[in-house]
Amino acid sequence: METVTLDGLDRALLHALHVDGRAPFRRIAEVLGVSDQTVARRYQRLRAAGVVRVVGRTDARLLGQVDWLTRIRCVPDAAAPLAEALARRPDTSWVSLLSGGEIVCNARARLRPEREELLLGALPRSPRVLSVSAHYLLRTYVGGQVAWSGRTSALTDGQIARLRAAAGTGPTAAKAPGLPHVPGVPDVPHVPGVPDVPDVPDVLDGLDGLDGLDRALLAALAVDGRAPLAALAAASGSPETTVRRRLAALVDGGLLFFDVDVDPRPLGFEVEAFCWLTVAPGRLAAVGRAMAEHPEVGFVAATTGPSNLVAGLVCRDTGAFYDYLTQGLGELEGVVAVETAPLLRSVKRAGMIMPSSNNP
């Protein structure tokens, strides 16, 4: 993939997508003061270069699932092949290769047989695998529906407000009667005498509450969260109006949200690392919330296991990494111990296997 240098417009576009991942190019162009063709070209270039992807993601809890964080230690020359094998599994959303022959991955499971397959069936029975530990992700403070605050700050408060208002998510947005607004999807006008509430199953009943249309939409949006309504209709075999209403129900029910996956390196962040913290139980929530405000923290969640908080750190260089460990973390009350490991390679990110050329 090509090496990309971001200018001010690129950064503004990334910030706009962070505000509304499905915002039409026309709306973004109006806010940025450029043509919609320019915005479309910039987005396609950044997406082709692996800098940004908008993906549709689901709330594990509402599907009756659990997110697992698995740590695998193996002999160093076995780490890369094993990480690549884990990345090919459909139940993993990200897989990272760390220093010292360690792999960290995230996977979802619901039923006990699925949990047993995750822990026992995914790994080869080999002395080259030295240890495996798997832990629930109990509460996410940054990541998922709460985006990394350090990604970019290229837009003014006024521009952010305009995007949010147009998307129906800002404080000045007027909620139209009937169906909730889905960012990036035109509203279906209300027709007198026709019920506004779509006739869909209760999406909060878990996987069994999803029908074929739901599954088709979620699968397509997991690949491209900005897929046009026409493409979603073709993928699901349903009329666009039906797709629009079902999409609205999934979003309004909280099951579906849109995440913006950004490669931090073009933004000037050269060091990524995982960090495991042992925090006094009474301070766990406070430390998690405090770290969520730190621009160096791209992900932080409470977890089971010997360490009760895990974080993904994104820093400009090793000096900034050191400063964060000694100052950002060092000033937090209740942190008892810290373990860190540099990230060497992102093997899978946001559900997509990453090409080797897109890694350091």
Image (spheres, rainbow, N blue to C red):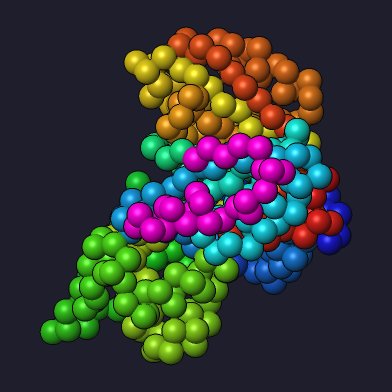
Compared with 325, 167 (above or below) is below
Looking at the rendered image, the quarter that the C terminus falls into is top right
Which quadrant holds residue 345?
Answer: top right
**Closer to the camera, 296 or 230?**
296
Residue occupying image coordinates x 80% and y 50%:
359
Quadrant showing the N terminus: bottom right
Query: Could you say where residue 278 lies in the image, as x and y percent from the top left?
Result: 50, 19
Q: Is residue 121 magenta?
A: yes
Q: In the drawing, does residue 99 fall left or right of residue 161? A: right
Q: Which region is colored magenta? A: 109-134
Is any atom of residue 329 visible in this view?
Answer: yes
Q: Which corner quadrant of the image does residue 316 belong to? A: top right
Residue 246 can be seen, yes or no:
no
Q: Position of residue 82 (x, y in %)?
A: 70, 52
Which residue sits at x=69%, y=29%? 341
Residue 340 on image: x %, y %:
66, 25
Say if 105 sits above or below 288 in the image.
below
Q: Is residue 324 magenta?
A: no
Q: How many marks?
A: 0
Q: Residue 118: horizontal and vertical position, in percent?
A: 49, 53
**Residue ID at (39%, 37%):** 138
Report the front residue among 118 and 251. 118
Taking the view exactly as shown, the residue that stands out farthest to the left is 193
